[in-house]
C-alpha cells in the first residue's frame, strides 16, 4: 500500500511512503504515522491520501516506520479545508498541518500529553458489597469517624460509590487525619483516577436573557437573511446587545444538535465572554486559544473528535482548525479586527475569511458582528453577497457617546498643554472621578514607542540585527527591539559624540501613566499594553480589577478598544488621534475610524451618557468630522471611492511578497529578476520591488513586491505563475538561498 503523508515541512505538499502489509489494516486517512525524512530525521505526519496505484517511480520510496494512532485524528472536512488554505494563502500543506494539529498529539513533539489525576476514595474490598455493619462496629468509639463514614455514604451514592478526596473533606468538614484512620482500618481506600480538565462547571445553567424588541427584530431578520444567504453581517452599534443575540442563535443551533464556533480576535476578550456564556451552556462550552496549556488543548481536540460533551467552542483564530463534527453556525465577533490575520509564520490566513469557507464545507451559517465593519464586509453586504442586519439602539437606550475634539496644536501655541492632557480632558477626568465613574485613556501603540535620542547629534540606538530604533522601557530600564525581541543595556553616552545626556523621545503608555500618577496621586491606575500582559492571567487581572472598580483609570493600547463591556466608564480620552491617521497604509483611515468609534463605544454603556475627549492637531480633518458624527457610512463612501481609484481591496486582491537574503546586493538583483518574470505575465499588477520601512530584520535584508490582482481572478492560475517565477529564480545559482514569503490579503 502506498500513501501520501503530509509532513510538517515547508517543501512539497505531501510525500509518498510505503506501508508494509502488516500495517495496512491500521492505515486510514487522518492517521498519524512516523516516517523518516531526509537522512535521519523522524517526523510525525498525517496520512492525507491512500493511493490506488503505486507511484510512477518506486525509487527512494521509504517505508512507514510506525502507526502512531490508528484512529484518524481529524474529521471530514478538515484535510480539504487545509488544502483550501494552502492553495489560497500560497503555502504548503505541511505548514497548515503544523499550525492545525496540537503538537502534543504528535510523537515527534517533546511535549506529550499527561492525563490529570486526582485521588478518589471508595470502600475497600471487604466492604464493597455494603457489608457495613462490621465497619461501623469497628469505629463505635469515634464519633468523628462515624460521621465521616456516614458523609462518605451520602455523598458518594450518586457517583457509584466514589468521591474525590478533596470533595469529601470539604463537604464533610473532616480532617485528613480522621480520614486516614478510616483508611488504616481498611474501611476506606484511596485510588487515582483520570479526570477531565473540561468538566468543571459546578453550577446550574441559566435560561437565556430575554431579547428586547430591537434585538428580537434583528434576530428574526438574521434568520430571514439565512434563508437566502450563508453569511449575514450584523452591524450593531456598541453596546446594542450583539452578544445577547448570539446567545439565542447559539441555542437554536444546539437544539438542532449542531455545533457552534464563536470566534474572538483577542485572548484578552475571552475571559469576559467565557463568563457570560458559561452561565448558559456550562460544560458544553470549550475555550481554545494559544495560552491554554497543551494538555487542555488535547482534551478539547479529543473531546470533539469523539464528540462527547463540547458543542460550543469559543476561541481565537486557531480554533478554526478543531475537529468539528457538524458546525451549524460560526460567529465572528468584532469581525473588522486585524488580529484575525495570522502574520508569521505561514499559513498567513485570515480567520474570518477562512471561517466562511469552513462554514460552506459544513453547510453552516456565519454571522459577522461589528459596530464598525471592515470595508470589505460592508461592501459584500452592499453588493448583496452577504445579508445585512442593523441594530441602531443601545441596550440601555443611552445615546451614542459625545465626542469632543480638542485642538492640541492651538493649545500648545498658547502654552496650555503642560502635560500630555488638554485642560478639557483633565477637567472631565476630575468630574468623572468625583462622580465615582471610571476613565479609559487610549494611546496608539504602532510606531510611537519611545526611544532614546542624543540631544546634541540626534543619534538614536538601533538594533544590531534589524534596521530599526530600539524602544526605551523606563521601568525595566533597558532597550528592546520590537522586531527580533533582543534586549539591550542602556548606553552610558552617545557613541557618536560622547555626549552623556541621552533623552527619551516620543511617548508611550508608560509616560501617560507617570503623568496621571502625578496629576491624581490618590487614584488607582492600571496600564494594559503588550508589556503588562505577557501572560493571559495578567490581562485577565487588569480587566477584572477594573470591572470590580478597584482601579479608576485604565490606560491602554489597542487592547482596550476591543469589545470589552465595562459598566462604569463614563469618559474616554484619545491622547493623540493624529498618530492613528498618519500611516502609509491604505487602511489607515478605516482603522483610525474604527479605533475612535470603538474607544468611544466603551463609554456610557449603562445609564450615563458617555463622553470622549479626542486630542488632535487637525480637528477639521474629514475623518475626525465623520467620527464625531458617528457616520460610518460616510467613512465607507469616502474610503471605497479611494480604494476603487487606486485598486485596493475590496476592488483588488493584494499579495505581498517579501524576499530575504543576507547580502543586500544579491537580494537587489534577485528581486529585480523575479519581478521581471512576474511582469511578463502580470504587467502593471506588479509594484516594486521596494525597501520596506524596516529594511533588515534578524540580519536579513528585505525587498517587498506588491501584487494588485483583480478580485475575480483565478487563484490557481496566479499560483502557477508565482510558482514558475519562483522556480526560475531559484535556478540562478547565486539566488538559490533567497527566501520568499507570500502574504495574501495582508492586513
Ligand atoms: P455589544 O456586544 O453589542 O457591544 P453587549 O451584548 O455586550 O453589547 O450588551 C451590552 C450590555 O447590555 C451587556 O452587559 C449585556 O449583558 C446587556 N444586555 C444587552 N441586551 C440584554 C438583554 N436582552 N437582557 C439583559 N441584558 C442585556
Ligand atoms: Zn551624540
Ligand atoms: Zn532586532
Image: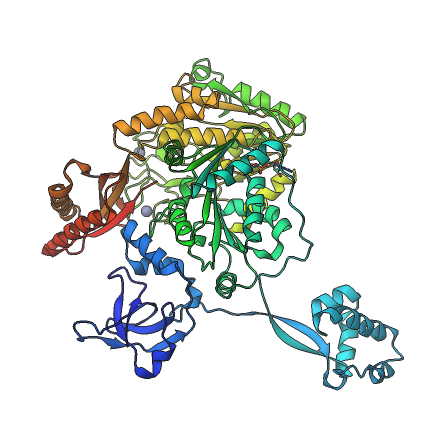
Q: Is residue 331 left or right of residue 482?
A: right
Left or right position of 464 against 559: left
Q: Quadrant of residue 61?
A: bottom left
The residue closer to the viewer here, 467 or 549, is 549
Which of 245 and 645 lies nearest the eye of the viewer? 245
The colour mode here is rainbow
Residue at image position (34%, 58%) is: 80
Percent x, y of residue 629: 48, 20
Q: Nearer the viewer, residue 569 or 44?
A: 44
Residue 346 in view, yes or no: no
| Quarter of the figure with residue 711 | top left
Residue at 30%, 31% in the rendered image: 584
Q: Is residue 151 above or below residue 250?
A: below
Q: Quadrant of residue 580?
A: top left
- Image height of 26 relative to 563, above or below: below
Q: What residue occupies the far right of the structure in this picture?
A: 141
Residue displayed at 37% across by 72% down: 28
From the viewer's side, name the closer residue of 503 and 639. Answer: 639
Report whether 224 appears left or right of 744: right
Residue 155 visible, this angle: yes
Amino acid at each position: 500500500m502506498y500513501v501520501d503523508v503530509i509532513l510538517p515541512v515547508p517543501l512539497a505538499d505531501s510525500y509518498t511512503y510505503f506501508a508494509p502489509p502488516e500495517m495496512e489494516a491500521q492505515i486510514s486517512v487522518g492517521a498519524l504515522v512516523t516516517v523518516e525524512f531526509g537522512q535521519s530525521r523522524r517526523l510525525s505526519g498525517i496520512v492525507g491520501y491512500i493511493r490506488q496505484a503505486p507511484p510512477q517511480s518506486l525509487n527512494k520510496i521509504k517505508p512507514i516506520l510506525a502507526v502512531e494512532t490508528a484512529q484518524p485524528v481529524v474529521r471530514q472536512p478538515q484535510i480539504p479545508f487545509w488544502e483550501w488554505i494552502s492553495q489560497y494563502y500560497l503555502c504548503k500543506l505541511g505548514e497548515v498541518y503544523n499550525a492545525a494539529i496540537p503538537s502534543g498529539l504528535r510523537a515527534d513533539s517533546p511535549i506529550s500529553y499527561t492525563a490529570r489525576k486526582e485521588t478518589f476514595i471508595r470502600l475497600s474490598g471487604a466492604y464493597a458489597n455494603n457489608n457495613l455493619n462490621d465497619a461501623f462496629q469497628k469505629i463505635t468509639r469515634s464519633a468523628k469517624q462515624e460521621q465521616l463514614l456516614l458523609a462518605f455514604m451520602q455523598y458518594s451514592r450518586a457517583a457509584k460509590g466514589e468521591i474525590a478526596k478533596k470533595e469529601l473533606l470539604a463537604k464533610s468538614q473532616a480532617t485528613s487525619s480522621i480520614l486516614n484512620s478510616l483508611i488504616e482500618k481498611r474501611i476506606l481506600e484511596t485510588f487515582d483516577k483520570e479526570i477531565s480538565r473540561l468538566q468543571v462547571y459546578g453550577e446550574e445553567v441559566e435560561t437565556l436573557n430575554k431579547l428586547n424588541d430591537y434585538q428580537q427584530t434583528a434576530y428574526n431578520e438574521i434568520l430571514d437573511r439565512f434563508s437566502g444567504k450563508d453569511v449575514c453581517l450584523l452591524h450593531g452599534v456598541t453596546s446594542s446587545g450583539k452578544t445577547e443575540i448570539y446567545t439565542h442563535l447559539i441555542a437554536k443551533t444546539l437544539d438542532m444538535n449542531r455545533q457552534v464556533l464563536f470566534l474572538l480576535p483577542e485572548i484578552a476578550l475571552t475571559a469576559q465572554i467565557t463568563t457570560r456564556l458559561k452561565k448558559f451552556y456550562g460544560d458544553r462550552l470549550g475555550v481554545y486559544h494559544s495560552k491554554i496549556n497543551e494538555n487542555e488543548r488535547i482534551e478539547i481536540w479529543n473531546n470533539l473528535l469523539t464528540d462527547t460533551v463540547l458543542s460550543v467552542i469559543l476561541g481565537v483564530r486557531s480554533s478554526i482548525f478543531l475537529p468539528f463534527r457538524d458546525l451549524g453556525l460560526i460567529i465572528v465577533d468584532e469581525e473588522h479586527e486585524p488580529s484575525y490575520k495570522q502574520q508569521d509564520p505561514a499559513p498567513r490566513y485570515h480567520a474570518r475569511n477562512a471561517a466562511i469557507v469552513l462554514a460552506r464545507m459544513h453547510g453552516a451559517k456565519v454571522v459577522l458582528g461589528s459596530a464598525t465593519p471592515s470595508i470589505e464586509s460592508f461592501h459584500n453586504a452592499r453588493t448583496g453577497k452577504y445579508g445585512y442586519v442593523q441594530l441602531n439602539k443601545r441596550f440601555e437606550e443611552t445615546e451614542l457617546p459625545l465626542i469632543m475634539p480638542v485642538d492640541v496644536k492651538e493649545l500648545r501655541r498658547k502654552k496650555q498643554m503642560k502635560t500630555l492632557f488638554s485642560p478639557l480632558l483633565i477637567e472631565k477626568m476630575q468630574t468623572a472621578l468625583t462622580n465615582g465613574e471610571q476613565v479609559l485613556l487610549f494611546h496608539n501603540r504602532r510606531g510611537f514607542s519611545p526611544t532614546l535620542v542624543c540631544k546634541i547629534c540626534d543619534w538614536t540606538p538601533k538594533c544590531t540585527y534589524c534596521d530599526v530604533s530600539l524602544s526605551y522601557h523606563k521601568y525595566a530600564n533597558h532597550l528592546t527591539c520590537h522586531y527580533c525581541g533582543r534586549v539591550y543595556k542602556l548606553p552610558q553616552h552617545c557613541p557618536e559624540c560622547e555626549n552623556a545626556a541621552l533623552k527619551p523621545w516620543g511617548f508611550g503608555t508608560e509616560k501617560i501613566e507617570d503623568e496621571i500618577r502625578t496629576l491624581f496621586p490618590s487614584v488607582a491606575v492600571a496600564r494594559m499594553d503588550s508589556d503588562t500582559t505577557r501572560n493571559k492571567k495578567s490581562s485577565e487581572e487588569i480587566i477584572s480589577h477594573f470591572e470590580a472598580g478597584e482601579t479608576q483609570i485604565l490606560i491602554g493600547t489597542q487592547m482596550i478598544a476591543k469589545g470589552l463591556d465595562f459598566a462604569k466608564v463614563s469618559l474616554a480620552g484619545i491622547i493623540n488621534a493624529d498618530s492613528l491617521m498618519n500611516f502609509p497604509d491604505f487602511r489607515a483611515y478605516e482603522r483610525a475610524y474604527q479605533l475612535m468609534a470603538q474607544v468611544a463605544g466603551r463609554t456610557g454603556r449603562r445609564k450615563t451618557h458617555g463622553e470622549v475627549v479626542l486630542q488632535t492637531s487637525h480637528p477639521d480633518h474629514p475623518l475626525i468630522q465623520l467620527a464625531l458624527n458617528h457616520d460610518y457610512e460616510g467613512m465607507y463612501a469616502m474610503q471605497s471611492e479611494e480604494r476603487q481609484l487606486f485598486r485596493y481591496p475590496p476592488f483588488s486582491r493584494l499579495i505581498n511578497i517579501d524576499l530575504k537574503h543576507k547580502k543586500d546586493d544579491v537580494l537587489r538583483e534577485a528581486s529585480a529578476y523575479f519581478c521581471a518574470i512576474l511582469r511578463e505575465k502580470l504587467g502593471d499588477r506588479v509594484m516594486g520591488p521596494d525597501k520596506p520601512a524596516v529594511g533588515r530584520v534578524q540580519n536579513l535584508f528585505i525587498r517587498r513586491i506588491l501584487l494588485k490582482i483583480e478580485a475575480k481572478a483565478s487563484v490557481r492560475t496566479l499560483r502557477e505563475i508565482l510558482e514558475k517565477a519562483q522556480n526560475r529564480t531559484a535556478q540562478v545559482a547565486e539566488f538559490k538561498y533567497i527566501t520568499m514569503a507570500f502574504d495574501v490579503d495582508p492586513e
